[in-house]
Image: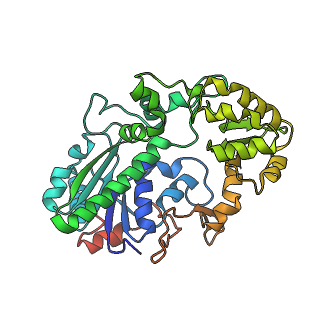
Amino acid sequence: MKLEGLRVVDLSYFLPGPYLTLTLADHGAEVIKIEAPGEGDPGRSIGLADGETTVFFRTLNRGKKSVVLDLKSPLGQKALHALCRTADVFVESFRPGVMQRLNADYATLAALNPRLVYCSISAFGQAGPYRERPAHDLAVEALAGSVGLTLGEDGAPAIPGLAAADMLASLQGLSAVLMALFRRESSGRGDYIDMAMHDAALGGLPNSLGPVFAERRAPVAKHERSTGGAAFYHLYQTRDGRHIALGGQETKFVRTLLGALGRLDLAPLAERGPGPHQQPLIQYLAQVFRERSQADWIEWFRGRDVCFAPVNDLREAVDDPQARARGMILLDDAGREHLGPVIKFRDEPPAPHLAAPRLGEHTAAVLAGLGLASEQ
């Protein structure tokens, strides 16, 4: 696998950091998860459990080693320092200032290991007026403007189903870690990565910035091309109360569908671009799609060259034949479901280990490898 021989020390909790290090682990890296005495990662108690751990925890932490250290004690800090001398990557997700108090900031660890790539993931980064604010995904997305673009039929903002700030920060952090490792091959030195969820959320909105940059105004979500102002990028209710999505505005898709419905006269409304002028077309399609059930429309669209999809619930999504064919749902020996790796190489495919570590399961072995006694 691509990352065999890479040692990662993971001091991150919840979602962004653990997903980053999960990706490294799936591709062969040794990920050593440092947890506090007592409850460990709070993710161990978030949500439903279907075994020894919650689904939330095992989905993000499979294949990692769990080492319990009291980083408020000198002995715990000594053990962490010894571990970081042997590490390639260090990931943490605490508020700015916490790592300094734990004697585990970049300056301290880089002095011990100049080749260390150190990634800090926080809500607002290490600088700026909000650096010390507590925040999780929803508050970050709200400040970054994405919640203000996610409006229901009543025009009120809705809670996004995808934790976009968390996931974007995780994936941007992964990219940054890999860039730094690549650069280390020539420079011989690691680097420090300041990854802010707020930066990542704002940076993930380039497709919505047209009116913001060109006209210095906020988008009107219901009139914009990807948030409700285009008939062919829209959600429609079906006769049985379910929904379908049209997700492609190119002329060929517009004309294919309207031609099949016998209403090519409406195509110019879509071809003029998004905006209020598309309302008659949206209303027409809304009326048409209410005439059949979702299942009927799935069959009707089969073989037609139109960007169409049923709006699945999450159970339907993981059962979808495309997800299964791509190996996105895996089963462990106990029959529990896991998300499969997203990154797939031809020559060195991922080989995820589907077991999640028990709290402190690897403490003795890892510390013994460093010449330390875990009893300390």
User: Which residue lies at the image location 66% right of the left edge and 22% below the top edge?
Assistant: 154
Q: Residue furthest left?
A: 111
Query: Can you give x and y, in whole percent of width and height, for residue 323 in the image?
Result: 64, 61
| Residue visible at 75% across and 28% down in the picture | 283
Depicted 245 relative to depicted 346: above or below: above
Residue 12 percent coordinates (x, y): 37, 51
In front: 362, or 340? 340
Picture quarter with the C terminus: bottom left
Residue 13 visible in image: no
Given residues 340 and 308, the one toward you in this image is: 308
Q: How many marks?
A: 0
Residue projecting furthest to the bottom: 347
- Of the 4 image quadrants, the one containing the N terminus is bottom left
Compared across the picture, whether 32 is left or right of 266 comes to left
Q: Position of residue 93 (x, y in %)?
A: 35, 47
* Residue at the image point whose x is 66% and y is 37% from the top: 234
Q: Quick check: 357 above or below 92?
A: below
- The front one of 34 and 287 is 287
**Residue depicted at 41% across the width and 72% down the height:** 28
In the rendered image, residue 309, in percent from the top left (x then y), is placed at 70, 48
Q: Quadrant of residue 9?
A: bottom left
For the question of whether residue 42 can be seen, the reply is: yes
